[in-house]
Image (tube, rainbow, N blue to C red):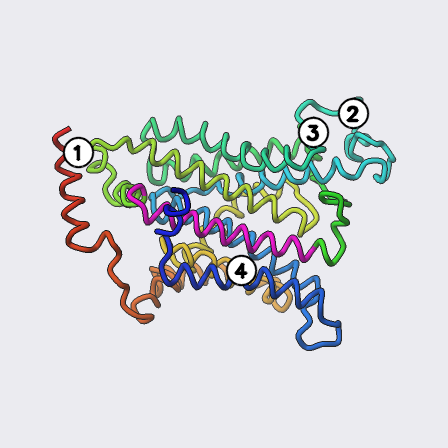
């Protein structure tokens, strides 16, 4: 049943994107590990890790597109879910350091020894196990999204007010995690990682495995998001986005659809943060900065909102440009980023993928576009109205 649900989500664009991501998961690590450094085909480890970071950003942008592009929820707080997933993974990595830290304490991380902690805080217990940390990567962002969404959506908070509240949530978490007494490293955050599931985190093989895992998780998340938006559930989501009052009048519990999508999106963002931390080597409260969440909106808009593939492309292109321009013209990068967003809004309101889609061939009618499917939908609507 689950397999059929996922297979129905496949169209030509999604299949091509999945093939490219899975090919990258195999070819890039192979070219890094199996080719000599003198070979023109060799991919240096730092380039592989840098592109792996871009893929985590792409996963974050995909998560935002699921709620913004198909549900109409412009979240300016997805950076918070990303950072929480990163902190969950960072806590596991800190517990793996053991006595190899600067202070040699087998249990307490260095920052806790420095701040005169006498015992490990209760919320750090369990993070010495990878399975527990992986569970928390999903549970913590998902739980926050559930609690936030439960109150916000039941109160029918929409539009710019919801966006402001999500940004306020992110800023509140930023201030909280900056405090030393929170037990998360304060301003310095978590860093100096040594191992992950028993392997040296700096080794080329581990870096290659992390890149492959990121590409695979991005492919799986794209498949899941496509399955959601192409299902009957996804059609209701589009109805919520375009005409929420009418959808509610038809009898749908709009807040339930919003809540489910928001929680799934938050979990995807948490996975992105968990994959980001071991590749970058640090997580600190700066990841909660509201500007980071706004950047995610820019990536999604540049690539193409409500296209799924567009945000992936936008995240990679914008961050690749950021890497190049901050090296060449560091003082002008923010102006370039703002100019890019304005240019896309004015000249490419549908984003790169949305603008190019009509020129890449006409879309074949989906099963829902056929007359029989429309008749079935009409019957369903009549039954729904009768009920």
Quadrant of the image occupied by residue 165: top left
Q: Residues within 10 Å of mark 2 (few under 14, many from 20)?
A: some
Please give the residue where the numbered disc 2 appears in the rendered image. Answer: 117
For marks 1 and 4, the one nearer the N-term is: 4
**Pointer 3: what residue?**
183
Kindly state the secondary structure of the residue where label 2 is placed: loop
Residue 85's place in the image compared with 37, above or below, is: above
Q: Secondary structure at mark 4?
A: helix
Predominant secondary structure, magenta span: helix
How far is mark 1 from mark 2, CA to CA?
60 Å
Marks 3 and 1: which is nearer the front?
A: 1
Helix or strand or loop: what does disc 1 sit on? Answer: helix
Task: Examine the structure image and report whether residue 83 is included in the region drawn in magenta.
Answer: no
Which residue: 71% across, 24% down?
A: 121
Residue 237 percent location from the top left of the image: 30, 42
Q: Residue at image x 39%, y 44%?
A: 67
Q: Are marks 2 and 3 in contact (CB under 8 Å)?
A: yes
In whole angstroms, how far apart are the C-alphas of marks 4 and 3? 38 Å
Q: Nearer the viewer, mark 1 or mark 2?
A: 1
Whether residues under marks 1 and 4 lie with C-beta atoms below 8 angstroms apart, the answer is no
């Amino acid at each position: 049943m689950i397999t059929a649900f996922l297979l129905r989500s496949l169209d030509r664009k999604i299949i091509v994107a999945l093939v490219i991501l899975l090919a990258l998961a195999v070819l890039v690590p192979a070219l890094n590990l199996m080719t000599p450094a003198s070979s023109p085909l060799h991919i240096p480890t730092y380039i592989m890790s840098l592109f792996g970071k871009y893929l985590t950003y792409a996963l974050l942008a995909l998560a935002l597109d699921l709620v913004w592009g198909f549900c109409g929820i412009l979240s300016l707080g997805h950076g918070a879910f990303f950072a929480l997933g990163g902190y969950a993974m960072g806590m596991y990595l800190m517990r793996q350091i053991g006595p190899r830290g600067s202070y040699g304490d087998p249990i307490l991380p260095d920052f806790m020894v420095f701040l005169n902690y006498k015992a490990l805080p209760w919320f750090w217990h369990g993070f010495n196990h990878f399975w527990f940390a992986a569970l928390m990567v999903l549970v913590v962002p998902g739980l926050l999204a559930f609690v936030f969404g439960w109150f916000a959506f039941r109160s029918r908070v929409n539009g710019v007010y919801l966006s402001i509240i999500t940004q306020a949530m992110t800023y509140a978490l930023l201030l909280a995690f900056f405090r030393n007494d929170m037990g998360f490293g304060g301003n310095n955050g978590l860093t100096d990682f040594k191992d992950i599931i028993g392997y040296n985190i700096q080794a080329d093989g581990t870096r290659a495995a992390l890149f492959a895992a990121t590409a695979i998780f991005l492919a799986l998340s794209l498949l899941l998001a496509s399955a959601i938006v192409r299902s009957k559930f996804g059609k209701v989501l589009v109805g919520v986005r375009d005409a929420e009052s009418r959808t509610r009048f038809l009898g749908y519990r709009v807040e339930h659809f919003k809540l489910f999508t928001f929680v799934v999106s938050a979990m995807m963002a948490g996975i992105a943060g968990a994959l980001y931390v071991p590749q970058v080597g640090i997580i600190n409260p700066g990841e909660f900065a509201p500007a980071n969440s706004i950047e995610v909106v820019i990536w999604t808009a540049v690539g193409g909102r409500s296209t799924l593939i567009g945000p992936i492309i936008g995240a990679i292109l914008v961050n690749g440009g950021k890497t190049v321009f901050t090296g060449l013209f560091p003082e002008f990068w923010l102006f370039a980023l703002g100019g890019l967003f304005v240019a896309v809004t004015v000249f490419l309101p549908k984003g790169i993928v949305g603008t190019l889609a009509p020129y890449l061939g006409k879309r074949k009618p989906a099963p829902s576009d056929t007359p029989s499917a429309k008749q079935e939908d009409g019957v369903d609507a009549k039954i729904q109205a009768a009920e």
